[in-house]
Image (cartoon, rainbow, N blue to C red):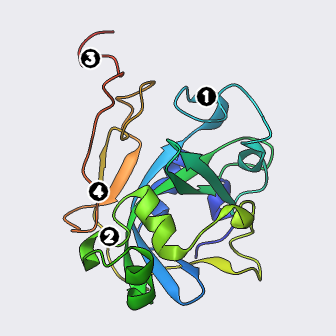
Amino acid sequence: MLDAEVLAGPPEQVAPLLLGAVLRHGEVAVRITEVEAYAGERDPASHAFRGPTPRNTVMFGPPGHLYLYFSYGMHWAANVVCGPDGTAGGCLLRAGQVVDGVELARERRHGAPERDLARGPGRLTQALGLAPEHRGLDLFGSGPVRLEPGEEGAPVEVATGPRVGVSQAADVPWRFWIAGDRHVSAYKRSPRAEPLGER
């Protein structure tokens, strides 16, 4: 059972539970294949590391809400807020497989091949048609964007590794993905990250 109570746990424990779940907006639904955990004020890679701001307030709110932010001035990225109310935390939805509304998703993604429709944070939000007005929505409420449990009984083998593109806490293994799934994005280490072995 996936609900706000389950999402109230620490982000690094919640993140793998989101694999196989489905994020739905209107006609389009995406099965989540890859996520990253960000642990707020105890995580230097998190937007909330230095405390609340107008941009990240949603991350401090109740679990199960949608945190959207504009990434690199190019695209929106979607996060599921997790952790106890008042403690910032979130899981970035890095990639997924479009399981409903493929044609509409392909139109939004300008004819991209099926594998690439939601393979990456910006592609995922574009395929779903997520926009700033969806920021802060309750994913278990009656709004247009909903988080639904995955297929019951479907086993998910979870792989873990470092997060993509972060310069702080670059080697923390809080990226989780469905092992062997072709809709997972490629790992790219930030060029600003501390070289491996230098501590």
**Does residue 22 appear in this view?**
no
Q: Earlier in the sequence, mark 2 or mark 3?
A: 2
Comparing 175 with 1, the one in front is 175
Residue kind at label 3, given as amino acid type:
Pro
> Is residue 114 positioned above or below 3 on the image?
below
Residue 156, numbered label:
2
Residue kind at label 2, given as amino acid type:
Val
* The image quarter in which residue 38 lies: top right
Asked whether disc 4 touches disc 2, contact meaning CB atoms under 8 Å apart, the reply is no
Q: Is residue 160 left or right of residue 71?
A: left
Spot occupied by residue 63 in the image (x, y as percentages of width and height): 71, 57
Label 3: state its secondary structure: loop
Q: Earlier in the sequence, mark 2 or mark 1?
A: 1
Comparing 159 with 146, the one in front is 146
Q: Earlier in the sequence, mark 3 or mark 1?
A: 1
Residue kind at label 1, given as amino acid type:
Arg
Spot occupied by residue 159 in the image (x, y as percentages of width and height): 28, 53
Density class for disc 2 (Cα within 10 Å; few <14, some 14-19, many ≥20) is some
Residue 195, numbered label:
3
